Image (cartoon, rainbow, N blue to C red):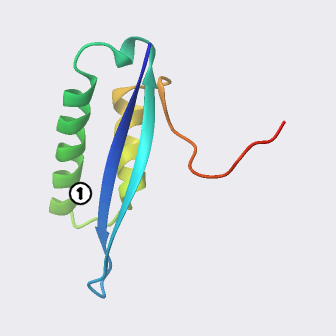
Amino acid sequence: MAKLIKITIREEAASGIATVSDRTIVVWGKASQNDTLEKLIDALSEAKQTLAEQALRKSGTCIVRETCDKLFPGSWDFVAQGGSLEL
């Protein structure tokens, strides 16, 4: 079983311009069972707060990647965006 989770990432540049992008991840295997979404929400909130307190600047995608690597090791990935495949 697998779960698709859409994550909306909001980032603001020093100029004050904000960008909003959606990234979708897929979580599979044991990591996709039970309260996957709740665990991810808690972990991302904690990571975002920790980084804000430390005055570190990382992209939203980087934060999601590091958090999911810790939370779902070997059982997650970003879903491909755009493009087409012809066979």
- Residue 8: x and y in percent read 31, 53
Residue that carries the numbered disc 1 in the rendered image = 51
Farthest residue, direction right: 87
At 22% from the left and 53% from the top, the residue drawn is 48
Count of picture labels: 1
The residue tagged with tag 1: helix, strand or loop?
helix
Q: Amino acid at mark 1?
A: Leu
Specify whether 81 is left or right of 17. right
Q: Residue at x 31, y 67 (%)?
A: 11
| Quadrant (top left/top right/bottom left/bottom right) for the C terminus | top right
In percent of width and height, residue 35 lies at: 22, 20
The relative height of residue 33 versus residue 87 in the rendered view (above or below) is above
Quarter of the figure with residue 58: bottom left
Q: Nearer the viewer, residue 25 or 70?
A: 25
Q: On the picture, is 18 further left or further right than 68?
A: left
Residue 38, percent across and down?
19, 29
Residue in the image at 56% along x and 49% along y:
81
Question: Is 51 on the left or on the right of 68, as rendered?
Answer: left
Does residue 15 appear left or right of residue 82 in this picture?
A: left
Q: Residue furthest bottom?
A: 15
Q: Residue at x 23, y 47 (%)?
A: 47
Q: Residues within 10 Å of mark 1 (few under 14, many from 20)?
A: few
Near-viewer residue (74 or 12): 12
Q: Residue furthest front?
A: 86
Asked which quadrant contains residue 57, the reply is bottom left
Q: In the image, is residue 61 above or below residue 31?
A: below
Residue 44: x and y in percent read 24, 43
Image quarter of the N terminus: top left
